[in-house]
Structures are given as C-alpha cells and as structure tokens.
Amino acid sequence: MSGVRVLVGTRKGAFVIESDGKREDWKIFGPFFGGWEIYHVKGSPADPNRLYASQSSSWFGQIVQRSDDGGKTWEPVGNRFVYDGEPGTHRWYDGTPHPWEFARVWHFEPSHADPDLVYAGVEDAALFRSTDGGNNWEELSGLRRHPSAGGWQPGAGGMCLHTIIVDPRDPNRIFTAISAAGAFRSDDAGVTWRPINRGLRSEGIPEPQAEVGHCVHRLAMHPAHPEVLFMQKHWDVMRTDDAGDSWREVSGNLPTDFGFAIDVHAHEPQTIYVVPIKSDSEHYPLDGRLRVYRSRSGGDEWQALTNGLPQENCYVNVLRDAMAVDSLDSCGIYFGTTGGQVYASPDAGESWKPIARDLPAVLSVEVQTLA
Amino acid sequence: MIRVVLPAHLRALARVEGEVHLDVNGNVTQQTLLDELESRFPVLRGTIRDQVTHRRRAYVRFFACECDLSHESPDEPLPQAVTSGAEPFLVVGAMAGG
C-alpha cells in the first residue's frame, strides 16, 4: 500500500512523520539530532531509503547525516566543505569586502537517477557536489567565480544558496537561487553559470532591474514543464516560461506578495501554492490569518485556502524550504511553520489538518511518496 | 593517558559516554591532543576546530586545571597535570545564546 513520509527539519532536531496513503493517521518519529539545527532533510528520488540531512550548530559547525533505511538510522558522512582555490571576497552588509566563509548547508538536492550524487547549497553562497553519497564534497566553483560574485551581498538570513533544481529531462541544466544575489542557471552540469534575473524588479537595491542583487526566496518547477519556473521573490511572485531568460510578475490578486515558500501541484503544472506573509519586517500572515493561496492558472488569479487553518491570532512564518507536495492521485500539500506546526492537506489544499502541532520552529519540509 | 571531557553534543556524535582517554605520543599540546582525538573519532573533525586552518571554533573553549587555555598557542605544551592524567582537558561549548 502506498504511503507518505514527511521529513521535517527544525531548529532543534529532525522529525520523520509517516502515514499510509489515506493520510489520516500520522506517526511522528524523532527528534533525531536533538538540539542541533536541521536546515534540510531530503530523500533520493532514485532510492527513497537514502536520505541526507544537514545538521549544524553555531557551536560545533556542520555535520552531514545519511540514512539508508528511510530515516530509522543515520550515519555521519563527510563534512569537509572547502572552497575551491583562493576564496576571495563578497560584499558585506556594510558594503565592505568580506572573505567567503563556510557557515552551513542550507539545502541538499539528490540526483534524480543516482542516490550517491547529491548537490549541496551552502552559506556563504556556493554549490558543492558529492558523487559518493556525501563522503566527499567538491565545489562547483564556476558559480562563485561568476564576475558578479564579488558584489553579492547577504540577505538577513546570511548569504545562502538555498534552492537547487536539476532539470529532470537534462541533468546538465541546473537552477540555483541565492539570497541576495538572484537566480542562476547552468547548462553544462554546473561548470559555467549565468544570472537569470531579467524581468525582476527590486525596489530595495540601487538599480531595481540589475542583473544580480535580487533577494530571490525560492524557485519551484513542475517536472513535466522544466522550462517553466515559479519564483517567490522577497516581494513579488514571478514566473518564467523560458527557463529564466525572462520573468513576469504573477502576483495578481494576492493580498500581499511577500513570502518565502512556493510549490507546484504534482499533477497540474499550472497549479501553484504560496503562503503570503505580511511584510519583510513583519514575518507573519496578514491579519493573523494563516492562508495558503492557490492559483490554477499559473499565477495572476489566486484563491485563498483556509479550511482547517487558524484564521485569527496566528503570527507564525512559513520559511522558504518548508513547503512540499506528495504525488498521490489526490495531491497532498504540506507546510511547516515557525510555531512548530506541520499542516497537511490530502486534497490539494481544500482542507488542512495539523499532523504535528508542537515541534520546534520548522525550517524545512520535504515529502516522499512511497510505493 | 590523557583524559578528555567532551560536551554532550559531541559525546553523542562520537557515540561515547563519560571521559575519552587518549594516548598522545611525544609533545602533548592542544594540537597533538586534538590530532589524536580526531584520529580516534573522525566524526569530530570540524566540530572543535576548522578542518583546514585548525583554528578553534568561536564558541568552543578549552579548560584545564581551572584555567582557560583557549587563547594559548595550539603548540604550547599542556600542563603536566593534564599530561599525567591527574586533571582532565575540557572541551566546552561556550554559554552563549541565552
């Protein structure tokens, strides 16, 4: 019988939440790595038992954990993330040059085909790759060596490479996003990169339509339409139909177009989800009402989804990596909050229930659909 | 035999309970002690000091004999009470963050 495994990273450990395909009864396992920040946990599409977890702390640095049994047991693997060559500098908050310094892994992206091939997006922004299941890491330094990189600046959360999407039809094509540099694309498996930010407009930077410098919060893609990407920017929800060569705004009737998370329905490539957040200084929902917004037209026209979500006195945030979908016939949507709730909808957003209520602040949510 | 006390998170990571006992050949310094510790427990590489520069992580402290040795040279010999095993070498996660 089919089932669902939800992988939750929090400020104080990882949790695995499982259900059968009905998605009515859930069981929570964990915490794993209690007391450590778990920025991300993700499973391999090629082997659902293979999971990667980013475990870090300000005290003791970065650990990479790997599971080969779906999260029941874990083994630490390689944690040596060394920038290629002389790291150089980027621009610090005050505008001065600042040496590139590794802080943590924000995001793992396992290959579609090979469980041992996995990409890691790190702070300070760079892309690393392991071809041996996480034991050894090498930087794909063409990204960090892009001529614009010396001018990249961190966002409030640090200068992080937080989004990695590998084109399921062409593994040489990789998309990344960096706060606050923007979106980038490689067409040669990560050797060379170019910014793909044409059409973005950010009032908070000196040149609003600059080639780089945009605070892109998240990208999402439907695997059947890899040339179409959706973006939650700091402000603005955007879409591209040409793999990032040009973007247009699709915020439409959203009550606020600030936010972090964005995702695409598993079976409907034009159905997308965001969680509008009031503003960049008020990281909570507008009017204290937690609403997911769904567009069935690939943007512009949005509908609030509220059934089962708190509609008063709710002041949590939903972070960029904290939304995911399953691929059961009736697509399930999942998201986690900084208040420690994980909400699930087994009917594409029509109704919601918390499957965990009192976890530490949720940093990331990923979902595996199990055969 | 040198006695090392690790903070709870690193004991869990290394899967040890209580003190770690090390034999360090030659001159016993922070550097040679940590080299031996990381050799015995490779999972600790990068958790106490940087893997490349060997610089102590900012929120890690080294105490022994009621002294803070954190700012001593990594190549300075450790106190005789530590090298004899009379006193432990403490790796401490700094109290920070409220």
Image (spheres, coloured by chain):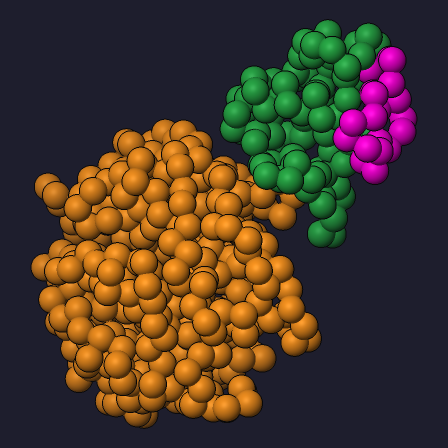
Which colour is chain B painted?
green
- In the rendered image, the residue lying farthest to the right is B66
Is A117 left or right of B68, judged from the image as shown? left
- Tell me the quarter of the picture where residue A71 sits: top left
Is A70 left or right of B14, judged from the image as shown? left
From what the image shows, is residue A85 above or below residue A247? above
Is A176 left or right of A13, judged from the image as shown? left
Residue sitting at 17 percent across and 84 percent down?
A297
The image shows a total of numbered marks equal to 0
Viewer-side residue, A210 vs B70: A210
Is B58 left or right of A187, judged from the image as shown? right
Asked whether residue B66 is drawn in magenta, I would say: yes
Kindly tell me whether residue A362 is visible in this rendering: no
The N terminus of chain B: image quadrant: top right
Magenta part, dominant SS = loop
Viewer-side residue, A79 vs A217: A79
Residue A362 position in % (x across, y down): 46, 56
Spot the orange chain and give its letter: A
Asked whether residue B18 is drawn in magenta, I would say: no
- Tell me the quarter of the picture where residue A97 sits: bottom right
- Tell me the quarter of the picture where residue A273 sits: bottom left
Residue B49 position in % (x across, y down): 65, 36
Numbered range of the magenta stretch: B64-82
Viewer-side residue, A329 vs B50: B50
Residue sitting at 21 percent across and 58 percent down?
A172
From what the image shows, is residue A253 above or below residue B44? below
Viewer-side residue, B93 vs A309: B93
Kindly tell me whether residue A46 is visible in this rendering: yes
Residue sitting at 34 percent across and 72 percent down?
A194
Residue A56 position in % (x across, y down): 53, 45
